[in-house]
Image (cartoon, rainbow, N blue to C red):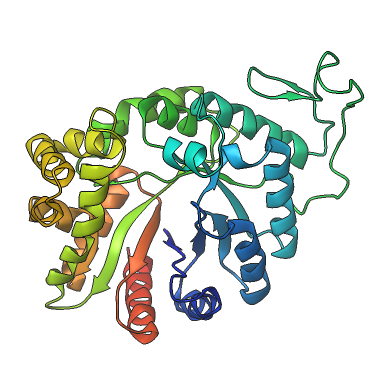
């Protein structure tokens, strides 16, 4: 199992990268660089390429609407070159609040667009001339549009790899099915080992049936917050505010994918209560309504025996790589948790 984490740079990006350097030595394998509507991810990924030696540098995630498919491919190829083959292109649809509210672009057909983008990226990396006549992207632009001067081109540089891994952050059935069919890695949200099959089993199976047998198995990243030691169970409560935000307040009442996942995970009554409380403005009560059982299953917080059990449960459910967050007040504490997790994973 590879160990990955989402880069947090709220306290300063350069200091965050210094910590990544220590975590890399402690056993970290993958760093996901977020974007949302903060600083752009590729700039930070290039900096990481210069400051690290071994970790995979993944966008986590680049919203598909903010760049052309060809630019997404060029960006990944450029970072892959700077890092000597350590890039992973993480893609996702984001949401209409960000795409329409911050970028001013219509949020349409996310699944179909990602399918076309994957095809275009792989064409670019092979250095084939890009000719794509899809429903959402036409390259070159047809003669009856623009100046009519566009012609098929191929990437000037020779990429380090002609098949850079693509990770997809997907939630809905159609998008998860497409991920299992085409992507190299999957970033699910609110993943618990016990509920994974009920939530995503059918979609994954349908995608696997159509998957190219020559492509490596889909790498599934999941895990949760990490704090390994006795008497640390109280730290599970740190995830209450974010869980309440997503389950209770993300999207509209009638269209909240996170609330749907929570419901399918066996917490339907609680999902409704959390949403009602959150939308009424009582965020603290919404946080309190999150079951302790869920917080335990969605974390790697506890003594070594508990964490070992959770790791086996994750592996048995299909997880092949961990996506975690190391808790601690200091860099030293977080690095220590990484070392402990690395030891437990290696002993499995």
> x, y (%) of residue 188?
37, 44
Front residue of 265 and 320? 265
Picture quarter with the C terminus: bottom left
Give the answer, above or below, for where 301 lies relative to 165: below
Q: Which quadrant of the view contains residue 215?
A: top right
> x, y (%) of residue 303?
17, 73
Give the answer, above or below, for where 108 lies relative to 191: above
- Label tally: 0
What residue is at 63 percent from the left and 76 percent from the top? 51
> x, y (%) of residue 230?
14, 78
Front residue of 196 and 248? 248
Q: Is residue 42 in sight in this rendering?
A: yes
What residue is at 46 percent from the left and 23 percent from the top? 209
Q: Residue furthest top?
A: 144
Front residue of 1 and 170? 170
Horizontal side of 163 relative to 337 (left or right) equals right
Give the answer, above or below, for where 118 lies relative to 297: above
> x, y (%) of residue 307?
22, 65
Q: Residue furthest right?
A: 149
Q: Is residue 213 in sight in this rendering?
A: no
What residue is at 86 percent from the left and 37 percent from the top? 154
Horizontal side of 85 relative to 103 (left or right) equals right
Picture quarter with the N terminus: bottom left
Horizontal side of 300 relative to 125 (left or right) equals left
Q: Which quadrant of the view contains residue 96?
A: top left
What residue is at 53 percent from the left and 29 percent from the top? 106
């Amino acid at each position: 199992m590879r160990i990955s984490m989402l880069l947090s740079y709220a306290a300063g990006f350069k200091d965050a990268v210094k910590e990544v350097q220590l975590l890399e030595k402690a056993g970290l394998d993958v760093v996901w660089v977020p974007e949302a509507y903060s600083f752009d991810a590729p700039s930070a990924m290039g900096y990481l390429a210069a400051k690290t030696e071994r970790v995979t540098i993944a966008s986590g995630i680049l919203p598909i609407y903010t760049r052309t498919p060809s630019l997404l491919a060029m960006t990944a190829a450029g970072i892959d070159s700077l890092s000597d083959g350590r890039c992973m292109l993480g893609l996702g649809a984001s949401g209409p609040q960000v795409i329409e509210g911050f970028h001013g672009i219509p949020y349409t057909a996310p699944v179909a667009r990602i399918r076309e983008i994957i095809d275009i990226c792989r064409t670019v990396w092979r250095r084939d001339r890009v000719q794509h006549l899809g429903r959402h992207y036409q390259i070159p632009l047809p003669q009856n549009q623009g100046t009519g001067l566009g012609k098929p081109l191929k990437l000037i540089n020779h990429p380090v790899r002609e098949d850079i891994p693509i990770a997809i952050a997907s939630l809905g059935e159609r998008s998860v099915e497409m991920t299992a069919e085409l992507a190299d890695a999957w970033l699910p949200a609110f993943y618990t080992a016990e509920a994974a099959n009920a939530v995503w089993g059918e979609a994954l199976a349908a995608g696997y049936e159509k998957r190219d047998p020559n492509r490596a198995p889909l790498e599934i990243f999941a895990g949760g917050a990490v704090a390994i030691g006795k008497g640390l169970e109280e730290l599970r409560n740190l995830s209450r505010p974010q869980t309440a935000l997503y389950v209770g307040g993300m999207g509209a009442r009638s269209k909240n994918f996170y609330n749907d996942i929570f419901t399918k995970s066996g917490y339907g009554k609680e999902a409704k209560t959390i949403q009602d409380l959150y939308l009424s403005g009582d965020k603290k009560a919404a946080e309190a309504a999150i079951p302790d059982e869920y917080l335990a299953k969605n974390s790697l917080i506890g003594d070594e025996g508990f964490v070992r059990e959770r790791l086996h449960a994750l592996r048995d459910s299909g997880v092949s790589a961990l996506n975690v967050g190391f808790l601690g007040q200091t860099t030293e504490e977080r690095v220590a948790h990484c070392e402990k997790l690395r030891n437990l994973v290696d002993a499995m």
